[in-house]
């Protein structure tokens, strides 16, 4: 028979062993910078005027360094990032004025998710909201040769490098994929950006037209 004091000591030791084991398991799940190559980050931003914007962050490896490309409807930024303690920052202009910072983690299924994210703009600090989510590459499907519906005004047909709104078939736009499923295009003097995301039951595409206040959501037909 164990005394109460011995039982307490044994319980404390068992708890210590359990916590140590959990720490070892967690340490084995640290994220390597190369893991970023299989993921994309999709951000949605609402500025101080409530204009909504799409932000796409994707990664490549150049000379053993990881580069992050940030695409917006009217511009693009490419920077080499330092991935330390599962975290990195993206300095959009290289001068510290506009910064996006992400801390990543793994869930029980070993998939990467965003533990925390921050946005900082020292030039125009006011904004309404900003949110972001990370997706595995296979969760984002190519838009080429597909049709998207959900709005009489904005139903879209894509070919391999051109696209049309069904309501104005006489006007053809051009586009290119940033990576399979994310695209930037032009129609007339207007710029567009969009991304096609697997929502489980369907692929939903959100896209932004430059100068428009709201984002548009369509789904793959």
Image (cartoon, rainbow, N blue to C red):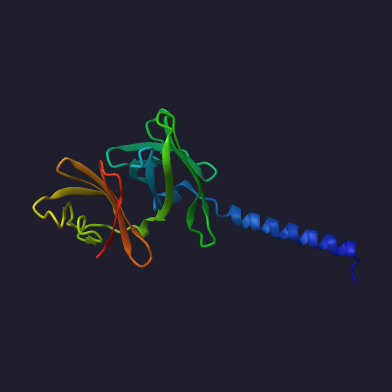
Residue 7, x across and y down, in percent: 85, 64
Q: Residue at x 34, y 37 (%)?
A: 77
Q: Position of residue 185 (x, y in %)?
A: 21, 46
**Quadrant in which the C terminus appears:** bottom left
152 relative to 123, above or below: below
Asked whether 104 or 205 is in front, the reply is: 205
Q: Position of residue 211 (x, y in %)?
A: 25, 41
Question: Would residue 100 be visible to someone looking at this image?
Answer: yes
Which residue appears at 37% of the width and 59% of the height? 139
Q: Is residue 62 visible?
A: no
Foreground residue, 140 or 13? Answer: 140
* Count of marks placed on residues: 0
Q: Residue at x 54, y 51 (%)?
A: 30
User: Furthest-front residue in view?
Assistant: 49
- Is the residue 147 above or below the residue 173 in the image? below
Q: Would residue 4 appear left or right of 121 to someone viewing this image?
A: right
Q: Position of residue 97 (x, y in %)?
A: 42, 29
Quarter of the image where the N terminus is located:
bottom right
Q: Residue extending furthest bottom? A: 1
Q: Is residue 28 left or right of residue 60?
A: right
The residue under the point 38% across, 47% down is 44
Name the quadrant containing residue 46.
Answer: top left
């Amino acid at each position: 028979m164990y005394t109460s004091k011995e039982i307490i000591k044994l319980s404390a030791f068992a708890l210590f062993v359990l916590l140590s084991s959990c720490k070892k398991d967690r340490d084995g799940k640290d994220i390597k910078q190369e893991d970023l190559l299989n993921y994309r980050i999709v951000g949605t931003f609402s500025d101080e005027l409530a204009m909504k914007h799409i932000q796409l962050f994707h990664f490549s490896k150049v000379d053993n360094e990881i580069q992050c490309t940030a695409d917006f409807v009217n511009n693009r930024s490419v920077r080499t990032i330092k991935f330390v303690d599962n975290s990195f920052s993206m300095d959009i202009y290289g001068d510290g004025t506009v910064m996006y910072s992400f801390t990543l983690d793994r869930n029980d299924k070993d998939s990467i998710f965003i533990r925390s994210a921050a946005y900082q703009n020292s030039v125009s600090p006011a904004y309404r909201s900003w949110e972001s989510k990370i997706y595995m590459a296979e969760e984002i499907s190519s838009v080429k040769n597909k049709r998207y519906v959900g709005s009489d005004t904005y139903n879209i047909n894509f070919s391999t490098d051109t696209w049309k709104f069904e309501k104005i078939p006489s006007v053809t736009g051009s586009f290119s994929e940033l990576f399979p499923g994310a695209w930037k295009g032009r129609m007339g003097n207007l710029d567009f950006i969009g991304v096609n995301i697997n929502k489980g039951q369907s692929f939903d595409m959100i896209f932004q037209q430059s100068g428009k206040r709201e984002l548009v959501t369509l789904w793959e037909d």
